[in-house]
Image: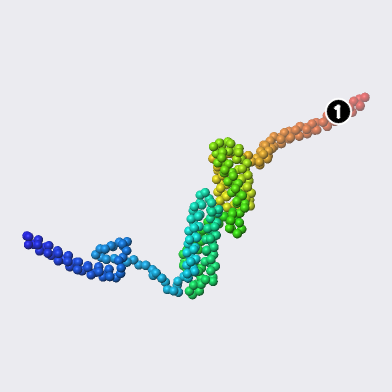
Amino acid sequence: MRVFTHYGRVLCLLLWGNALSFIGPLTLSVHAAGSKPPSSLFLQESGLGYFSPLSLAAKFPDDLEVTDYCLKLLEVFGHRNVALVSCLVSSARPVRVCQNCYGAYNSFNETYMNITLSSDKFGPENISCEDSLIRSNRLLLLYNLYSSLTEIWGLADCTSCLTPDRTSLSNSTLYFLASLNTTLSCFEKYQGNHSELCTECRDMYKGLNELYSSMQKNTSLCIDLEDAMNVTRHLWSKTYNCSVPREETVPVIAVSSFMLFLPVIFYLSNFLHSEQKKRKLIHPKRAKSSNSLMNIQDKFS
């Protein structure tokens, strides 16, 4: 029995040695094909070796390369795109998009215009930066990024709050912001006593509201001013429970009262007119009867 056990162990060792001698050259041949592969591969240093991932060539032929000038524009466009998005997100609440981000938007827009208008900067085979960066594939990545941010800027209507050259806030916008800050300072001063707040801050709030209405008629409002006024009105009416008597309520009440009593006036005048008409109809009959009696008396006499 011990003899069979001994021969079994020898046979296992022989088979294991043959297996190692077969796998060893395969492993060495795979390692010799290149340097040590990255540790992120799912098959690490096992007996089966490594599998290298496929990748695109590091560089295309010269006739397909983009010029250094276009690559520089692409890099600047990327940086300014990130700066604009970061500014928009940080100015989302409270809304300060137009006040804080018009500079970033101008720079972003200028870079995109430089790409589309760089007709004098051609690469190989006379390909412009616009063709190589924007129209080179169906994704149109730069165009879609630019269109999305331009659409957001248009929805905010920021040009209404800027000067014609779009380099600073307009005078009407600055005046409104100053009036707004004055009103909010009054709210903060008397917020402990709402009744006093409604009395002391009424004129400021009324003036701000009238200014906003006039700017609304002149289409001089951007999203910053609209949101600021909505918040201020909510504070005035909901938070502090204040109200401002409107001047147009007096004529409205007068007209409503007149319309309410108009049926009474109509029926009263109709009644008086009918009574007067009856009197006029009766008067001639009395006169006729008296004349007939006088004629009869004259005959008998």
Q: Amino acid at mark 1?
A: Ser
Query: 10 Å neighbourhood of mark 1: few (<14), some, or many (≥20)?
Result: few
Residue 95: tell me if it is visible: yes
Say above or below: 134 vs 234.
Answer: below
Viewer-nearest residue: 231 or 137: 231
Q: Secondary structure at mark 1?
A: helix
Say above or below: 232 vs 138.
Answer: above
Q: Residue furthest top?
A: 301
Residue at left 71%, top 35%? 265
x then y, percent, for residue 5: 9, 61
x then y, percent, for residue 133: 48, 67
Residue 140: tell me if it is visible: no
Viewer-nearest residue: 54 or 32: 32
Viewer-nearest residue: 191 or 236: 191
Image quarter (top left, top right, bottom left or bottom right) of the C terminus: top right
Q: Residue furthest right?
A: 301
Residue at left 50%, top 60%? 80
Residue at left 45%, top 74%? 63
x then y, percent, for residue 257: 67, 37
x then y, percent, for residue 228: 56, 48
Residue at left 53%, top 58%? 104
Where does label 1 land, which residue? 290
Image quarter (top left, top right, bottom left or bottom right) of the N terminus: bottom left
Viewer-nearest residue: 151 or 80: 80
Q: Is residue 244 left or right of residue 46?
A: right
Q: Is residue 115 left or right of residue 299?
A: left
